């Protein structure tokens, strides 16, 4: 059910307040009245109204001053100014100060009706926009982070509890576990979600490049610096900066970073102007920073500054129960992007995936599924589409005879060409094995 | 309040005929007997010379205090141009969930808009306006159903677009209001 729209009428004339009150009540709005601007502002402190209809001329504070104060309290407020005279300059001033519209008394009933309908439409658009934004955020979270295991649920809970704060976070975990996704989830569930999440892959940049990348540079700071350039810290103003592979930064950059984190201000390379930026910092590493601190490879003060909250993302082998969900997710993702009909995965292939240790974690699983969709021909991903277990399923062999020959050779080699033992292992009699050796012209390598 | 009947009181020079012609429809919409009577009131005290119109707010208060009773919903019909301070004109108004309302035939007539008079249209508009204002006295607010009589109408052509019937939702609301008083 749609929310009941609320209207606050501010006018020093009782008859005007009563008339408007009765008119709006009949339209089903929630209506309150105030006889002066001061009372209206007091009411607005404890109650919120969707539309404020205010007279421009009132004893004490006038409607324009009230409009300015309301706008400073709540920018989105819809204020309609009522005036007894169609004075263009005051109307223009009201609109400049943020009034939604103005109307000359007495109003034509139809004009008033239209005005309120327009304002109501504006309110519902604002609300709809908010809902859509929330949906977009929640969709991102749902789609990007997949899993039902206890291990990943723990990560979800940690994200939820840390998202609303401004605390620095270090995300740890093996390569390919989805540390950047965790950073994105924290950002998109935080109050900073409407501002950018700026990612920097520290490991891929040299010290001087990283410095310029993080702090920006002034024109002429170095050869090739033709224009001023904003750094990542500056770009992340009001948002979040994500420093991936933080363990790789040099001791000099560690000092610089510590200073920026403490002061939230910095100077561009080649510049002398102090620039402030309000950012939240999230870092990620696949290395043990604490051990690095103990060995003197990472500054202790920077470690404690960054490590306010630590979220450890478990490796895939510790969340095996998530593999079917992840596989399904990646199948959907790649079938859609390759414009292929949606396929599934057969039980034996899925079982093989669940048994595989995945040293490269989710990234490896994703690549495996992508490859299987590219090379696979059927409606299901089967064992032969997976690059694991090649030693048992050799797709280059097509004839049954060749497969038999290879298998017999493997078993004979295994038992040092002891015919009796090999025949027993193959569950055939010795004569049959001799016949096969003769048929395939097999000879011991020794 | 026990609404035993609806009282339609006509003030002005169009006589009793119009209210009688709409009484049956009013009775049918609210399922309450309608009584018609003529009223006499000196309207000069409600006249605003600056606007050359009659003050709808004061007139409604007068009807409520002098002509209305607790056992009826009272609707006064006038033939004068009504206004309220904030609006240029009104067709009528009523106390929401109260015991009285007013309506005027003045702006319902085609003659006011430079078109030839048509009593059938005029009567139809009055019927809708009376039922609309009485609906407010039963606690009904404006309805968004396009042909419901409780839809807000700010000009006469708007009145012509809707029917003189309550939609099922509004009818149900009126039913809830009346239920405790059913004998």
Image (spheres, rainbow, N blue to C red):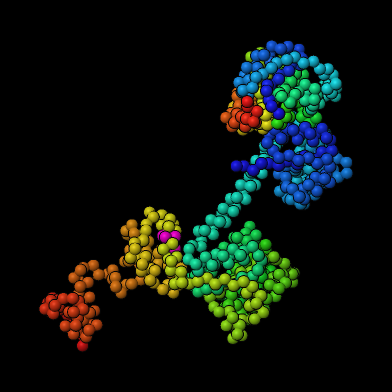
Res. B97 visible in picture: yes
| Residue located 60% across and 27% down the image | B166
**Nearer to me, A66 or A230:** A66
Name the residue furthest bottom: A446
Residue A159 in the image: state x and y as whole percent: 58, 65
Identify the image quadrant of residue A296: bottom right
Position of the N terminus of chain B, as image quadrant, is: top right
Q: Is residue A303 above or below residue B96?
A: below
Identify the image quadrant of residue A244: bottom right
| Residue located 51% across and 61% down the image | A144
Q: Is residue A331 above or below residue A77?
A: below
Magenta stretch: includes residue A329: yes
Residue A253 in the image: state x and y as whole percent: 64, 77
Image-based side of B91 in relation to A12, left or right = left
Res. A330 visible in picture: no
Position of the C terminus of chain B, as image quadrant, is: top right
**Nearer to me, B90 or A292:** B90
Identify the image quadrant of residue B173: top right
The segment highlighted magenta reads A326-331
Name the residue furthest right: A60
| Residue located 74% across and 33% down the image | A22
Image-based side of A179 in relation to B1, left or right = left
Q: Is residue A17 above or below residue B81?
A: below
Q: Main secondary structure of the magenta part?
A: helix
Residue B13 in the image: state x and y as whole percent: 76, 12
Q: Is residue A423 above or below residue A13?
A: below
């Amino acid at each position: 059910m749609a929310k009941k729209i609320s209207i606050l009428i501010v006018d020093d004339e009782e008859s005007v307040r009563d008339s408007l009150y009765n008119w709006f009540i009949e339209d089903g709005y929630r209506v309150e009245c105030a006889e002066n601007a001061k009372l209206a502002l007091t009411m607005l402190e404890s109650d919120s109204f969707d539309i404020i209809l205010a007279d421009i001329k009132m004893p004490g504070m006038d409607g324009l001053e009230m409009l300015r104060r309301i706008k400073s309290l709540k920018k989105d407020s819809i204020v309609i100014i009522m005036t007894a005279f169609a004075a263009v300059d005051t109307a223009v001033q009201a609109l400049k100060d943020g009034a939604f519209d103005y109307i000359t008394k007495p109003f034509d009933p139809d004009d008033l009706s239209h005005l309120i309908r327009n304002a109501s439409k504006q309110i519902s658009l604002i609300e709809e926009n908010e809902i859509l934004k929330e949906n977009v955020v929640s969709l991102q979270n749902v789609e990007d982070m997949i899993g039902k295991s206890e291990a990943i649920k723990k990560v979800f809970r940690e994200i939820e509890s840390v998202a609303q704060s401004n605390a620095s976070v270090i995300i740890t975990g093996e390569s390919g576990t989805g540390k950047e996704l965790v950073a994105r989830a924290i950002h998109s569930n935080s109050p900073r979600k409407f501002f950018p999440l700026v990612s920097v892959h520290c490991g891929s940049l040299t010290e001087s490049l990283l410095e310029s990348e993080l702090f920006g540079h002034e024109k002429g700071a170095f050869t090739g610096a033709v224009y001023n350039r904003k750094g990542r810290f500056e770009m992340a103003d009001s948002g979040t900066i994500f420093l991936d592979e933080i363990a790789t930064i040099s001791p000099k950059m560690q000092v610089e970073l510590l200073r920026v984190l403490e002061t939230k201000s910095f100077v561009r390379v080649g510049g002398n102007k102090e620039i402030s930026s309000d950012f939240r910092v999230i870092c990620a590493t696949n290395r043990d920073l604490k051990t690095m601190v103990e060995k003197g490879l990472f500054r202790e003060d920077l470690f404690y500054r960054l490590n306010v909250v630590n979220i450890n993302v478990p490796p895939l082998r510790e969340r095996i129960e998530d593999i079917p969900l992840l596989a399904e997710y990646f199948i959907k993702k790649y079938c859609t992007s390759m414009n292929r009909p949606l396929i599934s995965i057969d039980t034996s292939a899925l079982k093989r995936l669940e048994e595989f240790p995945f040293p490269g974690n989710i990234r490896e699983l994703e690549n495996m599924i992508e490859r299987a969709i590219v090379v696979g021909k059927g409606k299901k991903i089967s064992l032969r589409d997976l690059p694991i277990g090649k030693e048992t399923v050799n797709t280059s062999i097509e004839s049954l005879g060749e497969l038999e020959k290879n298998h017999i050779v493997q078993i004979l080699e295994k038992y040092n060409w002891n015919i009796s033992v090999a025949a027993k292992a193959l569950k055939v009699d010795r004569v049959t094995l001799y016949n096969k050796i003769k048929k395939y012209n097999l000879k011991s390598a020794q | 309040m026990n609404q035993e009947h609806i009282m339609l009181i006509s003030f002005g020079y169009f006589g009793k005929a119009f209210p009688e012609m709409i009484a049956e429809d009013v009775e049918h919409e609210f399922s309450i007997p309608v009584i018609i009577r003529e009223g006499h009131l000196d309207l000069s005290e409600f006249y605003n010379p600056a606007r050359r119109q009659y003050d709808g707010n004061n007139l409604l208060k007068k009807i409520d205090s002098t002509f209305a009773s607790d056992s009826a919903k009272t609707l006064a019909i006038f033939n004068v141009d009504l206004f309220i301070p904030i609006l240029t004109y009104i067709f009528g108004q009523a106390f929401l969930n109260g015991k009285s309302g007013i309506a005027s035939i003045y702006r319902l007539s085609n003659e006011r808009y430079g078109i030839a008079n048509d009593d059938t249209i005029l009567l139809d508009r009055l019927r809708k306006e009376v039922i609309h204002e009485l609906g407010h006295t039963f606690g009904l607010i404006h309805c968004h159903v396009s042909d419901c009589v409780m839809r807000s109408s700010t000009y006469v052509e708007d009145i012509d677009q809707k029917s003189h019937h309550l939609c099922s939702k509004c009818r149900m609301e009126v039913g809830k209001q009346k239920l405790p008083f059913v004998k």
